Image: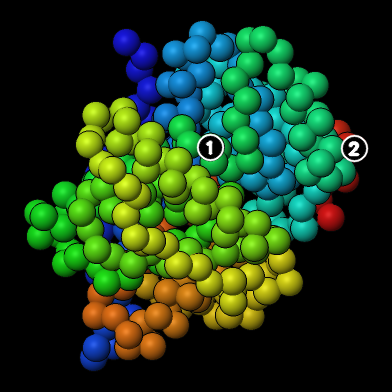
Amino acid sequence: MTQSAIGNYPTPVERLAGLGTAKTTLWVKRDDLTNPTYGGNKVRKLERLIAEARRRGKRRLVTVGAAGSHHVLATALFGGRAGLEVDAVLVPQLRTPHVAEDLRADVALGAHLFTARTYAGAALGMIAHARRDAYVVPMGGSNVVGALGYVDAAFELADQVKAGALPEPDAIVVTVGSGGTAAGLAAGLRLAGLRSELVGVVVAAPAFFVRFWTRRLARAAFWRHARDHGLAVRSAPARALTFTSSYLGAGYGEPTEAGVKATAIAADAGLSLDATYTAKCFAAALDYVQSARFEHVLYWHTLSSAPLAPLLEGAPDEAALAPALRRLLR
Ligand SMILES: *Cc1c(COP(=O)(O)O)cnc(C)c1O
């Protein structure tokens, strides 16, 4: 038996009482609390990915991400805890204090870090590092194996609806970066019999490719789950997934005005957001509440709320980072 459960489930669902309107209630799914050391949405994906790497007898994870990638940080932490070596190829990202801290934490966690100037270069770098003992984890942990973690999450939500923790949401609003989270949820919602519309808020570019890839991954996750559980489904159900690219702004990691406003509103409600992912998604969730199209809107919170300080113990100062790493912070 491989021991791979790293998350605490179910994560709570809560009502954001101050942010509703007469017509619409706003709820939050607290996936920031998936793990006390480092939570967020990468935990559910990595649980599956680490188990798969072990099942295949691998000793090493090779992955890729931006300089401040939450996925690389989570892989360094949980891969390391599982006894796996972690190699990551990093590409430049706009510097924010948060991005710089994530990078310093990667170093402190002992990940082997390599740099590339572009994602194309990073792909070549991953191939170069993909030795026989390595399991290659794509950007964001978003392959079909990773997405299955979010199929499970949809079943978890369905159980919470059944238990009366919240009503069946009319709309669920989630961030779409590399797509694994939204893809798994889209597949899982249908498999679990929920009728909620899933709204994917695209925060990475090019948006058309993100949409295409996420849909593909949703279909793959649907069939893989059905196969793994011996379900006799004959056709993938009607689309559960719609997208909006209206909150992307100038691009991945580029803050937006709507995001800054949403961050202040969320802070008053006790939720802290990041500029790259959750600020844009929460801005969308607030607009869906205001639109009065839905009675119950669920915002799926994907950012770790665990304090980063313990992971920064022993990390080099930014000025002491290797020059190649420092150059990643644009
Ligand atoms: C990675 C990440 C996302 C995006 O999830 P994907 O599965 O890559 O689409 C959303 N929010 C946060 C905070 C993340 O770190």
Q: Residue at x 81, y 31 (%)?
A: 124
Crowding at label 1, few (<14), some or many (≥20) Cα neighbours within 10 Å?
Answer: many
Q: Residue at x 47, y 71 (%)?
A: 282
Q: Residue furthest bottom?
A: 22
Query: Closer to us: mark 1 or mark 2?
Result: 1
Q: Nearer the viewer, residue 65 or 238?
A: 238
Q: Amino acid at mark 1?
A: Asn
Crowding at label 2, few (<14), some or many (≥20) Cα neighbours within 10 Å?
Answer: few
Locate residue 243, reporting x and y percent: 50, 68
Q: Is residue 81 visible?
A: no
Q: Is residue 66 visible?
A: yes
Q: Quadrant of residue 125?
A: top right
Q: CA distance from mark 1 to mark 2?
A: 32 Å
Q: Quadrant of residue 114?
A: top right
| Of callouts 1 and 2, the N-terminal one | 1
Q: Residue at x 61, y 63 (%)?
A: 203
- Dot 2 corresponds to which residue? 323
- Dot 1 corresponds to which residue? 143
154 displayed left or right of 220: left
195 displayed left or right of 71: left
Q: Nearer the viewer, residue 283 or 121?
A: 121
Locate residue 136, reporting x and y percent: 63, 25
Q: Residue at x 79, y 36 (%)?
A: 122
Q: Amino acid at mark 2?
A: Pro
